Every structure is written in structure tokens, then in C-alpha cells.
Image: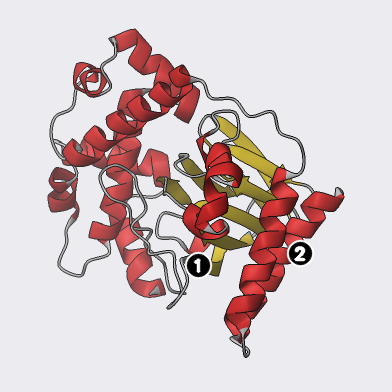
Amino acid sequence: MQMKNFMIDESLKELTKHHTVVMPIACYETTINQNIHGYIPLHWHDEIQFVLVVKGEATIQVNEDSIVVREGEGLFINSGCLHMAQEKDQSGCVYICLNISPHFVLPQELYTSYVKPYIQATNLPYLFLDPNKNWGKNILNAIFEMNHCIGQKSPYFETDITMQLLSIWKNLIVNGFQLEYVQTEMVKSQRMKQMLSWIHQHYAEKILLEDIARAGQLSHSECCRYFKRFLKCTPINYVMDYRIQKSLYLLQQNDSNVTEVAYQVGFNSTSYFIRKFRDSMNMTPLAYKKYKTHTD
């Protein structure tokens, strides 16, 4: 089984190019446990995203909220929102992922009135797509059809995709959302991204709580509250988890050894790295390395 690496930059922005040859759209199926981490790590992107679960169940976190999405259900994730996904109860979750540039949703003449207000609203980081509601069912059916069109590439499939996209967006906006624009929420999101970006740039170095707080222009206590709200963990625990994540790829390299990997990802003790790795992965780094060698 091929393990897929999920590429993000230091600011957690996803590096995947979400487009076909001629359209700023990407639609593909994702099996969560085939990712190198075993889950889809925290990230964000400028594109809006629609998810349709076709097998199993997923727990998807968007900003500070966690949403369980079951087979046949879906989720809209707004532009710029931090999100991650894990399969629930080892269900072998597979979902269709549709990413779209906001500027492609409608013609430019309509963008300002019918798209921009929605992607800038602070009370719409995500929207659950319920197949038991007509508008939700319409969106989910359109996602399925778009995935089919892109896969088949039948004649004029680009026009079929465009028609389905118009249907998706109309069904989303006709439901009468009372949009809000709270400046403090925008600032909180930006500060969280700044702190995560700083960690991702400096994870191999010695990191103190005051360093992380300074990156977000926050006090120590406020920094801890941000991490508890968004990630349900402390800042230092997040650093530890991120170092373990970064070690997974390095351990799979043929010429790597556990001690070198430990120091490369910021641990100053091999034994401490082994202990924290075992706590996270339920096996030692060496056992993981041997396991990956035999399964790849």
C-alpha cells in the first residue's frame, strides 16, 4: 500500500495544486489512513472545499470545532480555515474531496455580491451537508457528479462541471445565512496561524512557551488558551506531536538511524525521543522503521 505524504509549508498552507489542466478545480478520492501520518494533518488553503464521505466515518476539525461526518454526509470548509481529518473507529474512511478557487465559482461580475461575502464571513468556517435536507442532498449529488465527470473526461465535461458548480453554490447561499464579520475572530485566526507557522519553521531548535507566545503577540496564558481552543492541547505538546510527525518520513529513509532522526527533529535525547514516539505511535521508532521497510 502506498503511503501518501501531505505537503504543507511552514505556515500550514497546503502545497497541493488544486486544479485540472484548464480549470482551478481538483476533485479526488482520499483514503485517510493511507496518509503517511495515518490522518490528514492540520492545514489550510485559499480554495473552498467540499467533502463527501463515501465509506466509513471521519472526524473533521475546522478551526476549534470537531464534526463527525458519516457515509453519505458531507462538509463545506471555507477558504483560509484551519482543518484536519481523522478516520473514526478504524472505519477505513474514504471521501471525495472537491477544492475550488473562490474566483472560479461565479463570473467575476457576480463574485463581489455572491461569493466574497461568504468566504469572508467569520460565522461560516464550515457547513454540515445533510443528505436528509433537499439543499444538502443537491450539493452532495453534485459533488458526486463532478467527481464522475472529471474521472470520465467525456466530451464537454468542463461545461458539465461548471453547471454542477453553479448548482452547488446556489444551494449553499439560498439557505438564508445571516453572515457576520467579527474583526476579533479574524485576528484570532491569524495569530493562531502565525504561532503554528513559527513552530513549523523552528521545530528542530529548542522551543520555549515564550517563543511561541511571542510569535502570536500574546501572553503565555493567552497562548495556552489559543492552543486549547483550536487544538485541544498545550503549545509544547503540539511541538512534541509535530516533531514526531516529521520523524515518520525520515525514519522511512534507508540510510537513517534513530539517533540521527531524533536530533534532526529537535530532540536532544535519543531515549526521550523513543519514549515520546512510543507514546504517540504505540511502537518504538526502530519498530516503525522495520515495519515500513517490510510493508512498502
SS category of the residue bearing label 2: helix
Applied colour scheme: secondary structure
Query: Which residue extends farthest front?
Result: 109
Q: Label 1 belongs to which residue?
A: 26
Q: Is residue 198 above or below residue 99?
A: above
Dots 2, 1 in contact, CB < 8 A: no
For residue 141, which numbered disc appears in the image?
A: 2
Return the residue found at the far bottom.
155
Query: Looking at the picture, does residue 36 appear above or below residue 210?
Result: below
Q: Nearer the viewer, residue 146 or 203?
A: 146
Which quadrant, please, contains the C terminus?
A: bottom left
* Residue type for callout 2: Asn
Residue in the picture at 56% in, 37% down: 117
Q: Nearer the viewer, residue 207 or 152?
A: 152
Tell me where residue 90 appears, x and y as whole percent. 63, 54
Looking at the image, which residue is at 27% across and 37% down?
197
Q: Is residue 76 left or right of residue 73?
A: left
Q: Position of residue 231 (x, y in %)?
A: 46, 30
Q: Position of residue 152 (x, y in %)?
A: 62, 86
Visible residue check, residue 148 = yes
Task: Give the residue type at disc 1.
Answer: Ala
Q: Earlier in the sequence, mark 2 or mark 1?
A: 1
